[in-house]
Structures are given as C-alpha cells and as structure tokens.
Amino acid sequence: MITIDGSYGEGGGQIVRTALGLSCLFRKPFRMYHIRRGRKKPGLMPQHLTCVSAARLIAGAVVEGDNPGSTELFFSPGEPQGGTYAFDIGTAGSASLVLQTLIPALLFTGRMSSVTLMGGTHVPFSPPFHFLLGIFVPFLERLRVKVHLSIETYGFYPRGGGRIRADIFPSDRIGFLDLMERGEVSSITGCSGVGGLSPSIAARQQGAALARISASANELANKTAIDTINVPARGPGTFVYLECRSENSLAGFSALGARGKRAEVVGEEAAGGLINYYRSGAALDQHLADQIVLYLALSDHESAFTTEAVTTHLLTNLWAIKLFHRYTYSVEGKVGETGTIRITPPKEGP
C-alpha cells in the first residue's frame, strides 16, 4: 500500500492524477491524505472526481473517499481494460487533465481505446486542447506513444460543455528523449479564437500578440502568422494559442479571456509566454516539461532535456511518479530558472 501526502510540494490535483494513472498501470493501491489542503477549496473537485470515477471504471477499482471536498482517497485497482468510454465532468473542469490521467492507464491494455470527454477544453490552470494537439501529442509520438485527438465543441469557463475525443493506441514500450538544444526557430503559428462573441475581439487579441512579438523579439516578426477563428461553444469565451516550431523542438503558449479582461491583455499574455521561452534558449516549455516526465520515467533508456523554467509543479510530479516507479532523476537549476532534467530508468523491473 502506497501512502501519499497530497499536500506535498505544489500540493495540487496533479498528485491525484499522477497517482491514479500509475496506480492503474502498475496495479498498485494507494491511500492519499491532505488532498489539495492548501487550496482555497480543499479536497476533490468535480474534475478530480471525474478522474477517480473514470479510473475506477477502467480498472475495476475499489474506491473510498470519492466525495466532493474529500481530502482523503483510497484507490485499489484491478487490471485496466481498453475499450470505448465517455465521461462528463458536468462543469468547466478540465477535460485535458482528465485525459492525461487516463492515457497511462490505457496505454498497455493491448487494444485501442476511444475516450470521449465533456467539460472545459480551454479553461484556467490546465493545458488547452490546442496545446495537447500541437505539442503534447507530437512529443508522445516521439516516444512511440500514439494518440489521436479531435474536438467537436469548445468549452470555456464557467459554462463548460466542450466535447473532445481521444483514440489511444496500444504501446509495447516507450522511447526516450535527448533534447538539450532547441535550435533555430523556424516559425511561429497560432490562432486567436472566440466562441459566441464578436470576431472583432479575436482581431484585437491577434493584433496585440503580433505587436508584442514585434516589440520584444523583432527577429521573429517575419516568422509569425496568427489566424483568427470563430469556434462552436456552449458558452462565450476567447483564447490565444501560439506554437513555436524550431529545429529540434516544439513549444506552445496560451492565454484565456475573462469577463472584464481586455482583449489586448489576452494577446499580450500569450506572446509574453512565447518571448520568455525564446529568450531562455531551452528546448522545452515549462508546461510540457512537467507533462512529459511521466512517460520518460517509463522508458528503458535514459532521457535528458532542458526546460525554460524549473517549476514546483515539475518537481512535485517527479516526486509523485517515484512513489510508484523506482526510477531516478536529477534537476539542475533553481525554481523559476532554466534547468536541465535527467531521468534514468530502474536497473531492473518497475
């Protein structure tokens, strides 16, 4: 039985999601306490409860403590089963984060699985669908993990109602990553999107993003193209997503609109994230770094990469993974600064 302090490090829902995915993969039960203890609303929220119920269904798990606001959880899985599943978060909780819980659980079932998720697709504190499609999935492919994504309806905060589908193909082993140098930036593409709002808002976001890039890194201006799009959504919302393609890597940056937030601020925020990454010289953006380490830890080959910033989220996830899997890792660099991450597989067995 693995015992987990859910308030460790960053102390957020990532500990819950990582524990659920790896518990199913390795069939190791766990008990977690102090879940999200430092948050304004501690305990399990709708998105986390969807992760729990989805993992329970997939692995036939025995579960205790899966109640709204619960700060303790017991989870004991059986053998995960691939298949066709659909889960509705019921709020604007992140569909992307639920999906990232389920991929490790379904990856080695020996058959393709199709998962439909309803909830938020472009919401705060989670990777937007565009990031998963443009950055996360291509990096998984580098690691011999194949996932196909599609979106039917966009879901913004607070309405939610988005709908995405993921086809997760079976894998027999996971590759490694050796990515220390980003190389020259070849292009920056992206979109400024609105759902249920005036197209002029998308144009203002677009203009602000382009202006910020031109002012802060003029050498990138002639490599940048940002489209405006109008998307189907259950409730109003806006976003900007930028994708940086370089010689050796990909990186993604986004910002979301909100009531009372000027369109220009949204565009500037997304561009600011891009500029910070560009100036760091690192290969991976900070968000991909903490998402990809789970898969690198499952490889039978050592991996190494540079990231624009070491984050507490990354350090917490590395810690949580090690509770289930006897790999080793090293982090060179301080929190908030550019760093190098090295991940070494166990010498024998998981």
Image (spheres, rainbow, N blue to C red):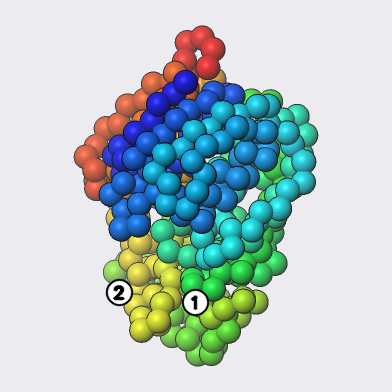
Give me the residue at 56% from left, 43% from top.
52
**Is residue 313 shown to the viewer in this render?**
no
**Is residue 346 shown to the viewer in this render?**
yes
Q: Quadrant of residue 83?
A: top right
| Residue position marked by numbered label 2 in the rendering | 215
> In x, y percent, where is residue 132?
56, 53
Q: Is residue 76 left or right of residue 165?
A: left
Give me the residue at 44% from left, 49% from top.
44
Seen as rendered, the residue at the extreme top is 348
Give me the residue at 66% from left, 54% from top.
87
Considering only order in the chain, which callout, 1 or 2, is on the residue closer to the N terminus? 2
Q: What is the C-alpha distance between the residues marked 2 and 1?
A: 23 Å
**Along the line of sight, which residue is nearer the eye, 96 or 44?**
44
> In x, y percent, where is residue 196?
58, 84
Q: Residues within 10 Å of mark 1 (few under 14, many from 20)?
A: many
> In x, y percent, where is residue 169?
72, 39
Q: Quadrant of residue 319?
A: top left
| Circles 2, 1 touching at the beta carbon (< 8 Å) | no
Residue 238: assigned label = 1
Q: Is residue 248 above or below residue 320?
A: below
Q: Amino acid at mark 2?
A: Ala
Seen as rendered, the residue at the extreme left is 334
Q: Is residue 191 left or right of residue 210?
A: right
Q: Amino acid at mark 1?
A: Thr
* Closer to the eye: label 2 or 1: 1
